[in-house]
Image (cartoon, rainbow, N blue to C red):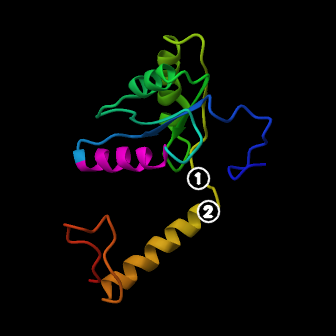
Amino acid sequence: MDRRGVSEAEPLGSRVGLVVVDHGSTKQEANRWHEEFVRGWGDVAGYCAVEPAHMELAEPSIGDAFDACAAADCEVIVVAPYFLWPGRHWSDDIPALAAAAAARHPEVTYLVAAPLGPHPQLRDVVDERVRHCLAHASGRGPSCEMCVGSAGCHLS
């Protein structure tokens, strides 16, 4: 098993592309955060391409990101929802958008992955964020990247 918990026999490696999909926002700053976050791991993840996408309300779309992975000669494209829980977007909307994109690339196999929750490491992520915000709000720690230029964390 590799660090992602996948057997080496699975179709991972230089020919797998990854599309990480958030909901999309009317606030460009939120979209920018997602795009920077996703592009930040593209160089170290071992995929042939890693592309951000927004399900709706913003570009790049799932179709745009899928096309970019296909253009990078990825043979398998994983569309990974950056959502916590299964819901209509995961069961209906994202698969429909992925299928429409895949129809343009019959040479590509694709998978819509499960949402993030209830992965146990999410507890650690939430706990780390809460502890950081409490330290910052009480004057014992620096602000985080989310609070820079905003009212940030504060105890009321």
Which residue is located at x 52 percent, y 11 percent?
103
Using the rendered view, name the quadrant where residue 142 is placed: bottom left
Using the rendered view, name the quadrant where residue 114 is placed: top right
Instruction: Residue 27: tell me if it is visible.
Output: no
Count of labels shown?
Answer: 2
Percent position of residue 97, x then y: 46, 23
What span is colored magenta in the figure?
A: 29-42
Using the rendered view, name the quadrant where residue 150 is placed: bottom left
Q: Residues within 10 Å of mark 1 (few under 14, many from 20)?
A: some
- Against 113, residue 143 (above or below) is below
- Name the image quarter holding the C terminus: bottom left
> Can you identify the residue that label 2 sits on?
121
Q: Main secondary structure of the magenta part?
A: helix
> Can you identify the residue that label 1 sits on?
117
Residue placed most toward the observer, 128 or 71: 71
- Against 75, residue 103 (above or below) is above
The reply to whether callout 2 and callout 1 are in contact (CB within 8 Å) is no
Q: Is residue 38 left or right of residue 111?
A: left
Asked which secondary structure carries label 2, the reply is helix
Residue type, numbered disc 1? Gly
Which residue is located at x 32 percent, y 65 percent?
145
Residue type, numbered disc 2? Gln
Residue 19 within the magenta-colored segment of the rendering? no
Percent position of residue 60, x then y: 34, 31
Residue placed most toward the observer, 3 or 87: 3
